């Protein structure tokens, strides 16, 4: 069973490139005052792009093996935890050091943040962000929600049922947009936290449906190459960085997640690249998760220790931090995260021959 799943699994290089570009733009958004005059106004939509990519990539990696019974729900959950938790905990540990170095929080609060962070629970204290040690972690929480729901109920998730989930989630999202006036930037604050559920469910299952449609039409002979790959990356940057006025922002964001991102990902699935461009896309994919989960705590500790330098040499210091954050993220990924995850898989799942193809699936499956 698993062998059949593996022979049909594909690797989508351009989707990897899109993940990396989105992660870089998220980082630049979070340090925007330090990289002016360039603005990344709509780059919070990178989270929605991540979620759609996640649906497509997870379906590509796991759908057949889950449906065939070659992988249990328990093993799937274990693999997703192994994929995300180590770097998340590392980012939280850096966040603790930064908070202590900064001295802005009392020790008992830091201890509370650490305990909550250990189990990835949002902080209930008023006046604090949901994940004070690592702000982007709110999206990882919702990533787990969508991933586990998908794996648990996959036998009931026909195309029709997925379409119903997408429509219901979209309606709830519109309610959130009109209720809070925050366009689609929902889920990361205490007031809008509950709307993180329809936000991830809409995008994630849109990705699953896109993957299924692409596989059904795989017999269509579409030949898209290097130019199309670069066009996809440029298009994603333009959409995420466009200066949109507040009057049109909600309409712009809805159009992006309903029309632009799905079409971009669908077309990217049919793009084939090779040589240097393929390696470049793969490196962007390898970079995406470590940069996403480490950049905020890395900047917090940089600001705590070198705050005066950062302020004095703007925007040079901001761009220097960006280069260092990318370098550190790649170093951590290849030297720490990959070997540690390999070790955890061996301990928690067992010998490789007991789960043929799991290593490939795990390496291609995150996004957030």
Image (cartoon, rainbow, N blue to C red):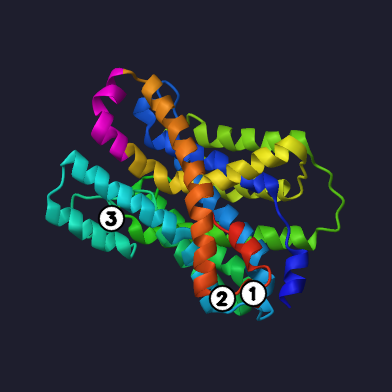
Q: Please tell me whether mark 1 sits on a helix, a strand or a loop.
A: loop
Q: Please tell me whether mark 2 sits on a helix, a strand or a loop.
A: loop
Q: Does the magenta stretch include residue 138?
A: no
Q: Answer yes or no: do the residues labelled 1 and 2 have beta carbons within 8 Å? A: yes
* Residue at the spot of label 1: 355
* Residue at the spot of label 2: 350
- Decide whether the magenta segment is chiefly helix, strand or loop: helix
Tell me how far mark 1 sits from mark 3, CA to CA. Answer: 40 Å
* Residue at the spot of label 3: 190
Q: Please tell me whether mark 3 sits on a helix, a strand or a loop.
A: loop
Where does the magenta region start and end? 300-312
- Tell me which residue sits at (25%, 63%) in the image: 115
Quadrant position of residue 151: bottom right
From the viewer's perspective, is the residue at label 1 or at label 2 nearer?
Answer: 2
User: Around disc 3, counting alpha carbons within 10 Å, would you say few (fewer than 14), some (14 to 19), or many (20 or more)?
Assistant: some
Quadrant position of residue 264: top right
């Amino acid at each position: 069973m698993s062998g059949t799943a593996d022979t049909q699994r594909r690797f989508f290089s351009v989707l990897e490139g899109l993940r990396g570009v989105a992660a870089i733009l998220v980082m630049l958004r979070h340090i925007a005052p330090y990289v002016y005059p360039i603005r990344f106004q709509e780059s919070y939509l990178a989270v929605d792009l991540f979620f759609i990519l996640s649906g497509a990539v997870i379906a590509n990696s796991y759908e057949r093996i889950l449906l065939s019974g070659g992988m249990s729900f328990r093993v799937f959950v274990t693999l997703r935890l192994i994929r995300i938790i180590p770097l998340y905990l590392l980012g939280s540990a850096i966040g603790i050091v930064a908070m202590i170095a900064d001295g802005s929080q009392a020790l008992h609060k830091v201890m509370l943040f650490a305990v909550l962070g250990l189990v990835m629970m949002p902080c209930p204290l008023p006046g604090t962000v949901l994940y004070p040690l690592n702000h982007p972690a709110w999206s990882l929480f919702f990533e787990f929600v969508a991933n586990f729901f998908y794996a648990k109920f996959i036998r009931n998730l026909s195309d029709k049922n997925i379409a119903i989930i997408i429509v219901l989630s979209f309606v709830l999202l519109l309610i959130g947009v009109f209720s809070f006036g925050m366009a689609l930037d929902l889920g990361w604050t205490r007031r809008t936290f509950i709307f993180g559920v329809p936000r991830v469910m809409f995008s994630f299952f849109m990705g699953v449906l896109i993957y299924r449609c692409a596989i059904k039409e795989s017999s269509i002979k579409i030949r898209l190459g290097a130019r199309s790959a670069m066009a996809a990356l440029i298009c994603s940057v333009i959409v995420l960085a466009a200066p949109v006025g507040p009057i049109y922002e909600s309409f712009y964001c809805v159009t992006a997640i309903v029309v632009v991102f799905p079409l971009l990902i669908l077309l990217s699935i049919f793009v084939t690249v090779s040589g240097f461009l393929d390696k470049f896309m793969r490196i962007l994919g390898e970079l995406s998760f470590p940069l996403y989960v480490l950049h905020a705590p890395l900047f917090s500790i940089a600001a705590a220790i070198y705050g005066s330098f950062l302020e004095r040499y703007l925007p040079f210091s901001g761009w220097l931090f960006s280069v260092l954050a990318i370098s550190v993220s790649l170093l951590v990924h290849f030297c720490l995260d990959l070997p540690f995850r390999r070790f955890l898989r061996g301990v928690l799942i067992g010998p490789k021959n007991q789960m043929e193809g799991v290593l490939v699936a795990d390496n291609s499956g995150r996004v957030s």
